[in-house]
Amino acid sequence: MPVSTEPRHPIGVVAERTGLTPDVLRVWERRYQVVEPKRSPGGQRIYSDADIERLSLLYRATRGGHGISRVASLSKTKLEDIVQNIEASATGPILFIPAGEPDSLVEQAIVFTEALDPTGLESLLKRGLSRYGLVTFIDSMAAPFLREVGEQWHEGKLNISQEHLATAVLQRVISEAAPLITGVKGSPTIVIATLGGERHANGALMAAGTAGSEGWRVIYLGTDLPVSEIAETVNRTNAQAIGVSMVIADRISRMEADLRELESMIPKETTLFLGGPRVIKKKKPKGRGRTVFLESMSELHNELSRLRRRSA
């Protein structure tokens, strides 16, 4: 029996049957024209059985790693083939990361952010974390997601509430994945913070999670700290390393003075790791053998692994 195309279902019914929230439905319709619901005499969206079937297929395809922009215009037959392949291979561990899959997940994360849907966003991020592991998740999904949120906020495509929601949810997911303060006896210690004036926490949180996954004792101090307080913590805990995240552009212009002061207050053998989207574009200063500029969390992971073996 053919599926009815008669519009008769309100958006609440569609959300219940498809798994999509009303806000995400509206975003998909506005940005990707996934379906064209009719309007009731009162101006409310009403959907047909065929609309619900298509939306359900799209939802299952996106959960399997396909970006909504890539599948929105596909026919029902092609969508059914995609979903069948996804669900047939759903069991068993992932052996590789399909090309473009992290980009699709970032795209979906932006949709949840735009829809102000923290539950959907958190669920998506946790699936990515479970699928890839912490370090790959941070490099392939979390960091690109944050960059995209920042760019869209600067362009006026996302408002401050949406930007704050994205940041809060990501922080919660990473914090739950890797406790920020650990105390395993015999483990090397790293102090992680941001310098005075730098209030963006995500880079520092991701570094803390990465260090914890490598077996380090992590002392996470948070954001906007004076150099003297970071140095005091390093000296009191005999930390082998410091991680500093830099995001705000005007902090980079004062970075040299802060780093010189920090290096003068810590033991010579302590390694300083410096990272952030602004920092990676800066040339490493001469004479800073104990300062390591990082471009990714996987690079931090490798550096910490080598440093831990060397100090064992």
Image: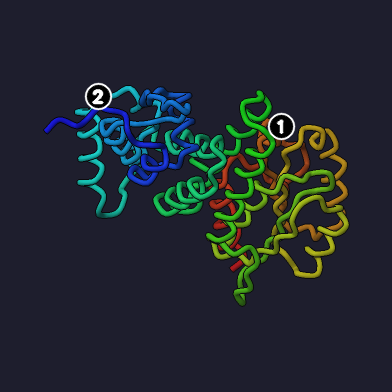
User: Please, is residue 240 above or below residue 199 in the view?
Assistant: below
Q: Secondary structure at mark 2?
A: loop
Q: Among all residues in the image, which is located at the extreme front?
A: 41
Question: In the picture, residue 251 is in which quadrant?
Answer: top right
Q: Is residue 188 left or right of residue 44?
A: right
Q: Secondary structure at mark 1?
A: loop
Dot 1 amino acid type: Lys
Q: Is residue 281 left or right of residue 233?
A: left
* Residue drawn where x is 15% and y is 30% of the image: 2
Residue at the disc numbered 2: 75
Q: Is residue 241 left or right of residue 133?
A: right
Picture disc at residue 274? none
Where is residue 117 drawn, in percent x and y?
53, 44
Viewer can see residue 246: yes
Viewer can see residue 263: no
- What kind of colouring is applied to the model shown? rainbow
* Residue drawn where x is 88% and y is 57% of the image: 228
Picture disc at residue 283? 1
Q: Quadrant of the N terminus?
A: top left
Where is residue 280 drawn, in percent x and y?
66, 35
User: Please, is residue 171 above or below residue 29 in the view?
Assistant: below
User: Please, is residue 244 above or below residue 67 in the view?
Assistant: below
Q: Is residue 190 left or right of residue 101?
A: right
Nearer to me, 284 or 209: 209
Query: Mark 1 vs mark 2: which is more N-terminal?
Result: 2
Q: Quadrant of the C terminus?
A: bottom right
Dot 2 amino acid type: Ser
Where is residue 229 drawn, in percent x and y?
85, 59
Q: Residues within 10 Å of mark 2 (few under 14, many from 20)?
A: few
* Residue drawn where x is 62% and y is 26% of the image: 157
Counting the numbered discs, the total is 2
Tag nearer the camera, 1 or 2 = 2
